Image (cartoon, coloured by chain):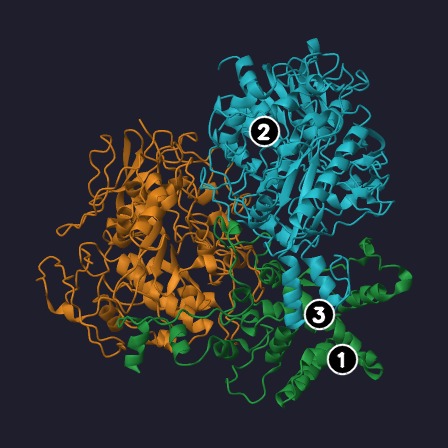
């Protein structure tokens, strides 16, 4: 498959430190050109997927990372590999966390083809957004656009109506869409210390997008017709997004959820965030330019060996303190996006009174909210139970430090982003099986069992004061867990359909589809 | 290459062995125990506990103690059994039980076809053993119930009701009569113990209040019984030459 | 929220259960300013604490996730409520230090309710059946000397409101399956029906062609407030088999959803931990204000006298405190002795005609494994016996098919059966030899029993009876010093004949299924034991009845102010600006779970209130 962003970085890496398990030659004419790069250049020798076997955190270095970034899409991994070829929880977790960092660097590389470093619009910002795929009247989405020259954010985007003439190159924030400001299942909005909403945006990569369009899943009628269509094609009547596979050198379906901060001048002066130009769009014609700062970043990647997907999440370091940090005392001068160290009366991790709807609250950038969320990251100590002295959280911090200090990263905005952890299905061979109807537990024992991004699952974080070694940092289903929650996602055939819903392969994107008929007014579905 | 667990499998190390290597370690997080080599001559105490539990519950060891164990149910049950009566003297009962079980199991290895639990129960009935074996007998039952229900039924409580049930003079035998007094009080060990309880697997269902299953599953036959109580088998390798498996074979 | 008492409200609503929530929502959407008073705790930000309480509870009764704490002397609790635990046979139901309700009958009133944000329906099953046309017409149709529903309230006039309620709540169902006994549907349900379980399908096959009481029996999927599709940003049902007491993914509707929607209008304020204690009547019999006791998180009163809230002069008050607390509040509102009968009680009917659906639950083992403990607690029922000529002589009933094995029936399976086989007991009655099992033998035996368990539930209509009533206790107070509700309850012969018919029906169905019955016969001294009238052979059987959680009738609606408390709009005859909503208005109990009808009537009342208020 082609991918417009397989732009090879200008230098060829050495392979000395790479253990290469496959000798498959690149035969597909996937090579594209970046500015000034001749097509079909020497990069065709590199496998499309970096084979990144980790031999311990201490072996991570700049050369190795650069070498990996020469593969495929800036070194975007096609799958994860355990550390040191071991099968214990710690080695596997290290492998997944390393995979997550490589994924973060690859996706946040500039869309222009430049190496990661100075802040610039990223690869993933060129992906399609949810409302551009699940359109208000169930219409088919527009084709995926591969921009060769100047991949602007928005090249792939449906432009809203006449109200936003200057939308080119800007990230559109659909403020009327409840998913933009209200966390999943209407669990609540998040207000920063400036009184502005945190806004949430969902993206998908081309692989995922094409599966949806080819299978007609972009409206409810198409989802209804899917089982019969599959049977006619002699394929399984199951939603099955294409998975990444190291051997086959394909990156799988990727979905992303980003949380953004609406940046004020003083926020921008910190130069601490990845910032892009955005437009705050409120139907029908209100379009306000705004600068967006990245504060949270979820990536879900389906791979053949992890049919329950691999779940990665990053946060900006200044979002919220952990409960340990609060207890120890916040140093004077330390600021957070969602926590005021001086507030004595603020209730922690609570949703605001009054309406959460920005229109009803009469919120806009010049009339921020008086209520500000007071958020604490409730801590987990996940022990690997192998006798080692460090917890899962300790180890990811070590890994974060290593990456922050890489020359490409140090001193850039990217050094301000922390991997929280990676959740992955741990039960083998369960994780490889495609027939969840025949499994006692189709989630295949996610590890770690709970995972929340303080900006995206603010109100379903694990319990406070979870103690080291305590078995229950959270409650199943009530406490945030990527895999457990996404496991509940289904399709959404029309309401009068006799076709039963189907599992939608761990994505809620499908249930945002609208009907082509006029009576569907749920969510963003509208008809004139 | 893809993740190592698959490689370990193909190299002949089963997931169970991986479990043994990884899982046979400390129970209490506060004590640091070095990782024993898988080839240790004498299985550490905790492994014996899993074997005992498997024999008692009829559930496969790998399900009781999976390779990567997010909830560490085994630790919760072991900890509870270890201090069954909150009394230093009674904490030895588990140690004794494990020793006796190991003895019975080794006797099995010498060619007798003997169920070690059955042997323990039989030994417990011998008059000369009654006093010594009785606490162990009821502790075994507490352990089964802990695994099945995620709840702790104290051995003493089980014993109290058990004797009463067998006493015809107390009239508990009526086939249609129900007495609330026969119900045994218990304590849920923890939410994750409840949701990991084995009884739901035996019922080919899921814990009430915790389902990972798909919409409409209740109208379809469940997976067969063994899927719930025995480890899953990997799918047979495909013959496609570009798959992981054959390439791995190449790279060896 | 100290400033709420300074704000001006159009409407003050007491109670945040489904009735109060729906009225608040509609009023908020119509830009009216609303204040909701709730005696209990606020809606939590997430359900972590509730799930924790539930998982850790040894008795997973409906109240187990919710506050206040279950084991507390009701005299110390500011907003207490009855609990299932206090109904145990060992006599707790009569012990005021255990039972919140002061029970004065020989038969315990066996249903419970909540006082918390979201009300009792936080732990409802979700069943959304409509009442039948004949349910509204029992006196005329069956010559029974019963109170009548108002002439403006019947199936035809409610049909559109039922549909609106189903849309608002999100009910999954099939109008074809539900078109029996005169029910007609103008529109489809908003979602397709929940699929039938294996147990449903087995029963369906086995009873095919069966006729009883001259009705053909059929298994129909039960319309339910349970998502068969993603709906309004809530998840599709995943069969957690935990509807009662709490759905971990909110695939089952509960009123906290409506409370959040009401909050989203920006026009609705909430005052939690605020126990209304007096409705104060002013000039011209208009309600002037409502007094309430606020209390803190530790359960202590705040202040030395009650606070008050008031609606503006053109506004109104809505009491939505369910059918025991509402009459309690009305009766307490004596205006310091000036109104000895309380508020809204010129008919004398407040508190009277307390009804429930006494429920008969037989259980047993099917001849083959059909795998209970899977899916929602109930997905289907046999509804054909809800109506028929027999209603002249004895109560009708509906039949609920349970998917949860013996969990509800024996009060705590699979624990009880598992302990039986491990410890050599026979509480389940299946371990006849008192076997002690372990290992493979335990797995095999337990699997065999658990996978064949099933139970039915017969919800019997209860005849209205003045003697069944709620009054105020003279001796027993709650933690705020307010008199606790005193309940006198009994079952009439008409109702008992209905239970007898239910038993007969159960026997016939069990025989048809070739099932082995394990229903326990209660002891004679069990207060919920009913000796059924002897049959033709002179044999009298004894069964046990349970409460269905349906509390009905205590401030009934009617067309005659002398005989009813409210009119067809749920508006008090006595006080023009007072509405009393909820299942307390039903003059008869019918055979459907009342919630959908509560919702339909509340939507109607909300519209009437909106029309009565001046435009902003």
Q: Residue A132 lies in what quarter of the image? A: top left
Q: In the image, what residue occupies the spot 27% across and 57% down?
A: A108
Q: Of helix, strand and loop, which one carries label 2? A: loop
**Please, is residue A250 above or below residue C253 in the view?**
below
Q: Are marks 2 and 3 in contact (CB under 8 Å)?
A: no
* Residue B176 placement, left or right of B117: right
Residue receiving disc 1: B122
Give the Cα separation between the discs numbered 1 and 2.
Answer: 60 Å
Residue receiving disc 3: C437
**Please, is residue B148 above or below residue C282 in the view?**
below
Q: Which mark is residue C130?
A: 2
Q: Earlier in the sequence, mark 2 or mark 3?
A: 2
Q: In the image, what residue occupies the spot 74% across and 52% down?
A: C518
* Residue C291 placement, left or right of A180: right
Q: Residue C107 lies in what quarter of the image? A: top right
Quadrant placement of the N terminus of chain A: bottom left
Q: Of helix, strand and loop, which one carries label 3? A: loop
């Amino acid at each position: 498959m082609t991918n417009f962003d397989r732009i090879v970085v200008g230098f060829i890496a050495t392979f000395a430190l790479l253990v290469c398990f496959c000798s498959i030659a690149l035969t597909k004419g996937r090579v594209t050109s970046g500015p000034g790069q001749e097509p079909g250049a020497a990069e065709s020798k590199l496998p499309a997927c970096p084979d990144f076997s980790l031999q311990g955190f201490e072996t991570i270095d700049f050369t190795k990372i650069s070498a990996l970034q020469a593969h495929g899409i800036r070194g975007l991994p096609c799958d994860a590999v355990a550390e040191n070829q071991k099968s214990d929880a710690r080695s596997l977790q290290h492998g997944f966390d390393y995979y997550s960092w490589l994924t973060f660097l690859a996706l946040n590389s500039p869309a222009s083809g430049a190496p990661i470093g100075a802040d610039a619009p990223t690869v993933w910002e060129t992906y399609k957004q949810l409302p551009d795929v699940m359109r208000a009247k169930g219409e088919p989405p527009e084709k995926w656009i591969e921009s060769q020259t100047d991949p602007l954010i928005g090249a792939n985007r449906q432009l809203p109506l006449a109200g936003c003439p200057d939308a080119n190159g800007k990230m559109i924030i659909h403020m009327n869409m409840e998913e933009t400001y209200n966390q999943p299942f209407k669990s609540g909005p998040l207000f920063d210390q400036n009184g502005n909403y945190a806004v949430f945006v969902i993206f998908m990569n081309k692989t995922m997008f094409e599966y949806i369009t080819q299978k007609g899943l972009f409206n409810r009628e198409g989802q209804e017709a899917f089982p019969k269509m599959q049977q006619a094609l002699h394929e399984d009547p199951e939603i099955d997004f294409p998975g990444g596979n190291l051997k086959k050198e394909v990156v799988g379906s990727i979905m992303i959820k980003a949380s953004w901060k609406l940046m004020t001048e003083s926020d921008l002066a910190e130069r601490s965030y990845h910032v892009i130009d955005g437009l705050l769009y409120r139907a029908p014609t209100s379009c306000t330019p705004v600068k967006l700062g990245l504060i949270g970043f979820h990536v879900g990647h389906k791979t053949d060996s992890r049919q329950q997907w691999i779940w990665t999440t990053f946060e900006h370091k200044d979002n919220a303190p952990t409960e340990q940090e609060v207890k120890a005392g916040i140093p004077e001068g330390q600021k957070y996006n969602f926590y005021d160290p001086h507030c004595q009366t603020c209730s922690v991790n609570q949703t605001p009174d009054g309406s959460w709807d920005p229109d009803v609250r009469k919120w806009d950038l010049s009339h921020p909210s008086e209520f500000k969320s007071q958020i604490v990251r409730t801590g987990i100590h996940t022990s690997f139970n192998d006798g080692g002295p460090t917890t899962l959280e300790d180890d990811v911090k070590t890994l974060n430090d290593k990456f922050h200090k890489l020359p490409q990263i140090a001193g850039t905005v990217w050094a301000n982003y922390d991997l929280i952890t990676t959740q992955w299905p741990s039960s083998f061979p369960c994780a490889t099986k495609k027939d969840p109807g025949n499994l006692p537990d189709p989630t295949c024992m996610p590890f770690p069992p709970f995972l929340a991004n303080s900006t995206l699952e603010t109100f379903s974080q694990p319990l406070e004061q979870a103690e080291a070694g305590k078995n229950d940092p959270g409650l199943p289903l009530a406490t945030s867990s990527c895999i457990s929650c996404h496991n509940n996602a289904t399709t959404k055939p029309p309401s009068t359909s006799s076709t039963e819903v189907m599992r939608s392969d761990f994505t809620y994107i499908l249930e945002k589809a609208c009907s082509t008929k006029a009576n569907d007014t749920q969510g963003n579905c509208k008809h004139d | 290459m893809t993740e190592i667990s698959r490689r370990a499998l193909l190299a002949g190390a089963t997931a169970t062995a991986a479990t043994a290597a990884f899982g046979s370690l400390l129970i209490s997080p506060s004590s640091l125990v070095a990782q024993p080599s898988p080839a240790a001559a004498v299985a550490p105490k905790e492994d014996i506990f899993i074997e005992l539990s498997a024999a008692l519950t009829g559930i496969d060891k790998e399900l009781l103690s999976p390779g990567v164990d997010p909830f560490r149910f085994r630790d919760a049950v072991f900890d509870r059994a270890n201090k069954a009566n909150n009394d230093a003297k009674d904490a030895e009962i588990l140690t004794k039980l494990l020793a006796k079980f190991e003895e019975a199991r080794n006797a099995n290895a010498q060619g007798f076809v003997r169920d070690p639990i059955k042997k323990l129960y039989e030994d417990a009935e011998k008059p000369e053993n009654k006093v010594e074996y009785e606490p162990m007998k009821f502790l075994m039952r507490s352990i089964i119930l802990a695994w099945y229900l995620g709840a702790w039924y104290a051995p003493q409580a089980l014993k109290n009701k058990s004797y009463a049930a067998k006493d015809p003079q107390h009239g508990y035998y009526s086939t249609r009569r129900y007495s609330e007094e026969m119900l045994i009080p218990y304590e849920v060990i923890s939410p994750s113990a409840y949701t990991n309880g084995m009884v739901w697997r035996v019922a080919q269902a899921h814990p009430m209040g915790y389902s990972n299953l798909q919409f409409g599953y209740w109208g379809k036959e469940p997976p067969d019984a063994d899927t719930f109580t025995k480890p899953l088998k990997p799918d047979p390798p495909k013959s496609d030459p570009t798959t992981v498996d054959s390439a791995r074979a190449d790279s060896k | 929220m100290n400033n709420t008492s300074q704000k001006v409200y159009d409407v003050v609503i007491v109670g945040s259960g489904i009735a109060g929530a729906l009225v608040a929502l509609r009023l908020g959407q119509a830009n009216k300013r609303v204040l909701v008073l709730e005696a209990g705790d606020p809606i939590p930000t997430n359900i972590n604490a509730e799930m924790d309480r539930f998982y850790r509870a040894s008795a997973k009764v409906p109240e187990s996730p919710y506050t206040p704490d279950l084991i507390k002397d009701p005299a110390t609790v500011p907003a207490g409520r009855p609990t299932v635990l206090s109904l145990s046979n060992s006599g707790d139901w009569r012990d005021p230090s255990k039972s919140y309700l002061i029970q004065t009958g020989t038969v315990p009133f066996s249903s419970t309710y909540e006082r918390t944000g979201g009300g009792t329906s936080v732990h409802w099953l979700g069943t959304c059946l409509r009442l039948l046309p004949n349910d509204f017409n029992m006196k005329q149709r069956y010559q029974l000397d019963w109170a009548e529903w108002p002439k403006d309230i019947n199936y035809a006039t409610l049909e559109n409101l039922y549909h609106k309620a189903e849309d608002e709540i999100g009910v999954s169902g099939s109008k074809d399956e539900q078109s029996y006994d005169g029910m007609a549907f103008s529109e489809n349900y908003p979602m397709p029906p929940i699929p039938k379980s294996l147990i449903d399908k087995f029963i369906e096959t086995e009873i095919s062609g069966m006729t009883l009481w001259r009705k053909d029996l059929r298994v129909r999927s039960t319309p339910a407030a349970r998502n068969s599709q993603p709906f309004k940003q809530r998840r599709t049902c995943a069969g957690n088999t935990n509807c009662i007491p709490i759905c971990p993914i909110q695939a089952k509707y509960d009123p906290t959803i409506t409370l959040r929607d009401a909050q989203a209008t920006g026009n609705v304020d909430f005052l939690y931990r605020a126990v209304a204690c007096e409705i104060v009547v002013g000039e011209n019999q208009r309600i002037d204000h409502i007094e309430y006791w606020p209390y803190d998180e530790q359960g202590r009163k705040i202040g030395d006298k009650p606070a008050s809230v008031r609606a503006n002069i053109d506004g109104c008050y809505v009491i939505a405190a369910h059918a025991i607390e509402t009459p309690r509040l009305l009766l307490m509102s004596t205006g310091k002795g000036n109104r000895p009968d309380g508020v809204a009680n010129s008919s004398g009917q407040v508190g009277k005609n307390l009804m429930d659906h006494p429920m008969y639950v037989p259980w047993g083992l099917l001849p083959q494994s059909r795998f209970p403990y899977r899916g929602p607690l109930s997905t289907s029922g046999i509804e054909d016996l809800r109506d028929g000529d027999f209603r002249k002589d004895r109560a009708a009933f509906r039949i609920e098919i349970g998917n949860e094995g013996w969990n509800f029936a024996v009060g705590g399976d699979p624990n009880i059966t598992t302990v039986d086989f491990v410890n050599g007991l026979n509480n389940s009655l299946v371990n006849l030899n008192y076997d002690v099992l372990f290992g493979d033998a335990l797995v095999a035996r337990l699997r065999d029993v658990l996978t064949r368990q099933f139970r039915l539930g017969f919800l019997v209509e209860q005849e209205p009876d003045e003697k069944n009533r709620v009054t105020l206790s003279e001796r027993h107070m709650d933690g705020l010093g307010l008199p606790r509700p005193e309940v006198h309850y009994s079952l009439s012969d008409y109702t008992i004949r209905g239970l007898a018919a239910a038993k007969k029906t159960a026997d016939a169905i069990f025989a048809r299924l070739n099932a082995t019955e394990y229903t326990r016969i209660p002891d004679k001294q069990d207060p919920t034991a009913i000796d059924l009238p002897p049959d033709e052979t002179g044999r009298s059987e004894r069964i046990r009845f349970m409460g269905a959680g349906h509390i009905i009738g205590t401030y009934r609606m009617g067309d005659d102010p002398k005989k009813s408390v409210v009119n067809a709009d749920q508006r008090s005859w006595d006080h023009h600006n007072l509405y009393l909503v909820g299942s307390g208005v039903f003059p008869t109990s019918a055979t459907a779970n009342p919630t959908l009808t509560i919702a339909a009537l509340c939507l109607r009342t909300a519209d009437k209130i909106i029309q009565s208020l001046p435009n902003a």
